[in-house]
Image (cartoon, rainbow, N blue to C red):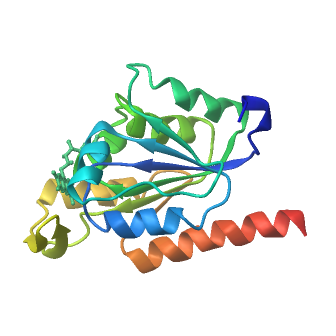
Amino acid sequence: MTKKDVPTPRFGWALTGSGHFFKECIAIMQGLPHLDVFVSKAAAEVMRMYKQEMVLPEGTRIFKDTTASAAPVGNFYFGVYHTLIVAPASSNTVAKCVTGISDNLATNTFAQAGKCRVPTIVFACDTAPEMDTEAPSGMVKVYPRRIDLENTARLKTFDDTSVVESLAELTAAVDARKQWLKSLSS
Ligand SMILES: Cc1cc2nc3c(=O)[nH]c(=O)nc-3n(C[C@H](O)[C@H](O)[C@H](O)COP(=O)(O)O)c2cc1C
């Protein structure tokens, strides 16, 4: 597919190295038309650990984190994306996003989406003082620190940013964007 043939506008999805509902996030991606996926270095490793493969609809583009300048995110400036989804978002990515750091592919998608006023949905993983999450070997308990919970709370104050805290909320938020897209063409 040449650049000219790429249907736009598209969903952008940043996948980070959080294992929290990692497999389920890939399943949601499978139902998205016109999608670009941005994979952080940690996400690429975690994907192998959970034995996941990116079997995504034809035409989906997958960008790996191979450049220091996060070159693929330049497309945000040309109206290529109507929505960015960061899911699942690791504590690390959320912490960087709330402090304005953009030093890899995932954090750059968030920063550039913000600068281009592209609506963004973030599935934050640190949402309660005690949580169950799936490690590659099975379910484990995790106790997000106060700083992690504070960062999630701070992210909720960002413009054009919806922070979702469960898979059901993520599904509903993504569906709402799909409905909105549909309404444009009817
Ligand atoms: C199997 C596995 C599961 C992980 N799950 C989580 C998680 O649920 N939440 C989290 O914040 N970090 C998790 N991590 C740690 C992140 O991958 C690590 O903090 C990484 O630096 C995040 O980088 P990124 O934010 O650039 O993707 C996990 C790591 C591994 C190996």
Name the residue located 79 percent from the left edge and 68 percent from the top edge: 182
x and y percentages locating residue 82 in the rendered image: 68, 50
Name the residue located 53 percent from the left edge and 51 percent from the top edge: 159
Name the residue located 27 percent from the left edge and 49 percent from the top edge: 17
x and y percentages locating residue 92 in the rendered image: 24, 45
x and y percentages locating residue 77 in the rendered image: 66, 30
Q: Is residue 66 above or below residue 127?
A: above
Does the image show residue 164? no
Q: Is residue 177 above or below residue 68?
A: below
Quadrant that contains the N terminus: top right
Q: Residue furthest bottom?
A: 168
Q: Nearer the viewer, residue 156 or 137?
A: 137
Does the image show residue 167? yes
**Residue 152 quadrant:** bottom left
**Residue 50 quadrant:** bottom left
Q: Is residue 75 left or right of residue 107?
A: right
